[in-house]
Image: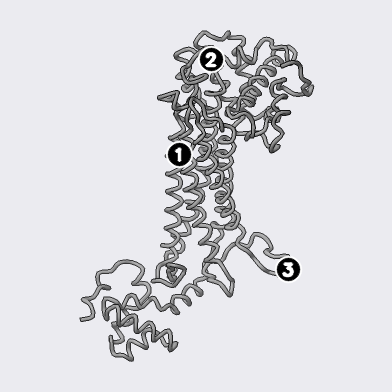
Amino acid sequence: MGELPVPAEALYGASTQRAVLNFPISGRPLPERFIRALGLVKWATATANESLGLLAATKAKWIQAAAREVAEGKWTSHFPVDVFQTGSATSTHTNANEVIANRASQLAGEAIGSKRPVHPNDDVNFGQSSNDVIPTAIQVSAVLVASEQLFPSLEKLTASLEQKADAFTEVIKIGRTHLMDATPMTLGQEFSGYARQARKSIERARRGVEALIELAIGGTAVGTGINRHPDFPAAVCRLLSQETGLSFREAANHFEAQGGRDDAVEVAGVLATIAASLTKIASDVRWLGSGPRAGLGELKIPATQPGSSIMPGKVNPVMSEMLIQVCLYSQGLTQTVVLCGRDGHFELNVTLPLIAHALLESIHCLANGTRVFAERCIEGLEVDSVRCQELVDRSLMLVTALNPLIGYDAAASVAKEAHASGKTLREVVLARGLLDAAAVDRALDPRRMTEPRADAVGAGAG
């Protein structure tokens, strides 16, 4: 396509510069973690080709060294191509081939652009295509980001919630359904539910990662494996597994691995589920800490910053609000991945760079949001035991415990009279002669209502 000026300090070449000029869209290149995974894949492909006798040891040495530097993040600034580019991300793949070849030239004492001793296509790209390398890099990067960032963050949140569940075991509070008063429970029980949600999020995330371990590498252009050695994909997967400690393997069917992105869509669904779970936890904490005097006020939320520019002393549930926004953003990104997954036409999906961006951004933000929420909110939560007891004492739903003793209709009548008159449930029951004092006190004991008890079930109203 002719000559094209390239910045003197750039490790990329004319093809990358042309893509920069062609796609001035968002100003956002692909995520660093994706670029680093791409470097790791290029290291593995060079090493595999060398082991198969297809790449000279001297060339392999320079490619491996340069690709390692890309994998370490040393040359990320030399990957300027926008997210919104060719649907196969060929521009970014070519960018990698050029950077690695030019860096190899530098390491070998040759000039950038000389294509000596390494050629970007003939050597760095030997036995490969954008159509199998980019899907491979997407999955490798997603697995690594999930393992290094999301898993530890979810573990941290789970541990914090489990600790609070233990600490709040003795605090009795009123339960709520439909946002309305329900029967008593302990705050520890409530937090045990949140902890279990977080624990199941970890389990879901780990199952999601399992969906990404089959790699497309070796399919080359359309899945047939043209121009590569039969043992090449297995060798690359083995090297990636040894390098990362993960268990990557060759795709069972290369046509599926390149024509569809169903594995990415599956993981997007897992991330959306995790985001929904985290939203529930963050929202409940925000409501339980509302107040401090005109809200529920059962929890005391850590004060992390002033809450208002006009109202002195106001403290807001900013960490809950942050995490809820992260989850909304993440679910939007995962929906993008789902929609991208539909655009696999014949032998190639043509939304690969957007999938890479959306999937990694979702994982990255969920991981950071979860970690910060655990550190700056959950770990510092305190309970207002007096407020919890006050709300239990005022609740009419303690009347539920009377159902087995006086029947549903009589219990409903007692509750209505107590509400209308301002009397306590105990006063109404005794005034009507429905139970003696000892029986009503035993039935209306909130602690007895927090777990199933055989002796709390009577024979009915008679």
Colour style of the rendered protein structure: one colour
Q: Which mark is residue 266?
A: 1
The one of 179 and 453 positioned closer to us in this rendering: 179
The residue that mark 2 highlights is 127
Whole-angstrom CA distance, mark 3 to mark 2, is 64 Å
- Quick one: which residue is furthest to the bottom in this view? 431
Residue at 59% from the left image edge and 57% from the top image edge: 321
Q: Is residue 323 left or right of residue 447?
A: right
Q: Is residue 434 left or right of residue 65?
A: left
Nearer the N terminus, badge 1 or badge 3? 1
Nearer the N terminus, badge 2 or badge 1? 2
Against 213, residue 388 (above or below) is below
Inspect the image, locate mark 2, and give the three-letter code of the amino acid beneath it: Gly
Image quarter of residue 303: bottom right
Mark 3 or 2: in front is: 2
Nearer the N terminus, badge 3 or badge 2? 2
Against 235, residue 73 (above or below) is below
